[in-house]
Image (cartoon, rainbow, N blue to C red):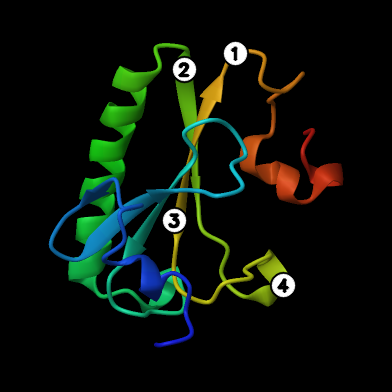
Amino acid sequence: MDTCIFCALRDSPHVIMRNELTFAVRDTTPVTPLHTLVLPYRHAPTYFDLTDAELSAANKLLRRMRTNIVEADASVQGFNIGANIGKVSGQSIFHCHIHLIPRREGDIEEPLGGVRAVIPEKMRY
């Protein structure tokens, strides 16, 4: 798609790692330092539109990026992985992208609840 900002990144110098079906870039508005996005080359609107081959390639690239991030920053002790699927979930760019968010001790006061924080009143259980 000519107007998709993520499609335009496919051959960009911003790509930090790639494989046959997916590529990785740093998030331009990171939640934490080294926050990375993994995207399919093909314009697929959501995670559920990916083929099995694309899902496998994305998973392989997520694992490679995890290793890359941990080697680059020894303070990383955990990760959040996620994808927003649909406008109601917060998706704003409709080209599938999977967030790999490095987490460090003390990056938030209380991490209990993790991804449940997308609905703040459901974070504590």
Q: Nearer the viewer, residue 75 or 89?
A: 75
Q: Earlier in the sequence, mark 3 or mark 2?
A: 2
How far apart marks 1 and 2 lie (CA) works out to: 7 Å
Tell me how far mark 3 sits from mark 2, CA to CA: 19 Å
User: Residue tagged by mark 2?
Assistant: 77
Do the residues bearing badges 4 and 1 touch, measured as CB atoms within 8 Å? no
Q: Residues within 10 Å of mark 3 (few under 14, many from 20)?
A: many
Q: Residue at x 27, y 71 (%)?
A: 41
Per the image, the residue denoted by label 3 is 98
Could you say where residue 91 lies in the image, as x and y percent from the top left? 62, 68
* Kind of residue at badge 1: Glu
Query: Is the C terminus in the top left, top right, bottom left or bottom right quadrant?
Result: top right
Structural distance between the alpha carbons of marks 3 and 4: 17 Å
Disc on res. 14: none
Q: Quadrant of residue 109?
A: top right
For label 4, the residue is 88
Q: Choose mark 3 or mark 4, whichever is in front.
A: 3
Instruction: Measure the C-alpha gap from mark 3 to mark 1.
Output: 23 Å
Q: Secondary structure at mark 2?
A: strand
Q: Position of residue 61 (x, y in %)?
A: 24, 48
Please report whichever mark, 2 or 4, sits nearer to the chain's N-terminal start.
2
The residue lying toward the viewer, choosing from 116 and 1, is 1
Give the residue drawn at x 39%, y 12%. Answer: 74
Figure quadrant of the N terminus: bottom left
Q: Which residue is mark 1?
A: 105
* Residues at circles 1 and 2 in contact by the CB criterion of under 8 Å: yes
Where's residue 107, x and y in %? 66, 21
Label 4: element kind: helix
Q: Secondary structure at mark 3?
A: strand
Left or right relative to 12: residue 27: right
